[in-house]
Amino acid sequence: MVKTTVYLDERDAVALRRMAAETGRSQAHIIREAIGRTTREIGPRRLRSAAVGHGDGAPIARNADEIVRAELGRSTR
């Protein structure tokens, strides 16, 4: 786990303390559960730029200079 600090307004802090006392769970546990639910609702990160280009799927690192020259229409060093 990673330690972090969360600032709450007084009303939320009181509600969190009350919930922890009533349920027998720690405040940290309640916060982790809430964050977990929220992040699961969002789902995995999607790259907006994925699959918007063109190509045959071949690796480009080996011939990057050639690709850049072809795309820009000019020669590089």
Image (tube, rainbow, N blue to C red):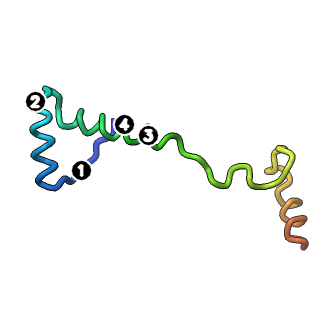
Write the residue at 12% across / 52% down. Answer: 11
Look at mark 1 in the image and give the residue it sits on.
6
How many numbered badges does the structure rendering display?
4
Residue type, label 4: Gly
Pointer 3 residue? 41
Q: Secondary structure at mark 2?
A: helix
Residue 42 seen in the figure: yes
Q: Between disc 1 and disc 2, whose residue precedes?
A: 1
Element type at mark 1? loop
Mark 3: which secondary structure? Answer: helix
Residue at 19 percent across and 53 percent down: it is 8
Give me the residue at 63% from left, 54% from top. Answer: 48
Q: Toward the viewer: 61 or 41?
A: 41
Disc number placed over residue 22 in the picture, else none: 2
Q: Which mark is residue 36?
A: 4
Locate the C terminus and report the quarter of the image it occupies.
Answer: bottom right
* 11 is higher (above) or lower (below) than 39: below
Indicate left or right for 37 with 31 as reference.
right
Residue 34 location in percent, x, y? 30, 38
Residue neighbourhood size for the residue with mark 4, other residues' Cα within 10 Å, grouped as few (<14), some (14–19), many (≥20): few
Label 3 to label 1: alpha-carbon separation: 21 Å
The three-letter code of the residue at mark 3 reads Glu
Q: Disc 4 on helix, strand or loop?
A: helix
Asked if residue 53 lies left or right of residue 1, the reply is right
Sequence-earlier tag: 4 or 1: 1
Q: CA distance from mark 4 to mark 1?
A: 15 Å
Residue 77 seen: no
Q: Earlier in the sequence, mark 3 or mark 2?
A: 2
Residue 70 placement (x, y as % from top left): 90, 65
In which quarter of the view is residue 35 placed?
top left
**Quadrant in the rendering for residue 17:** top left
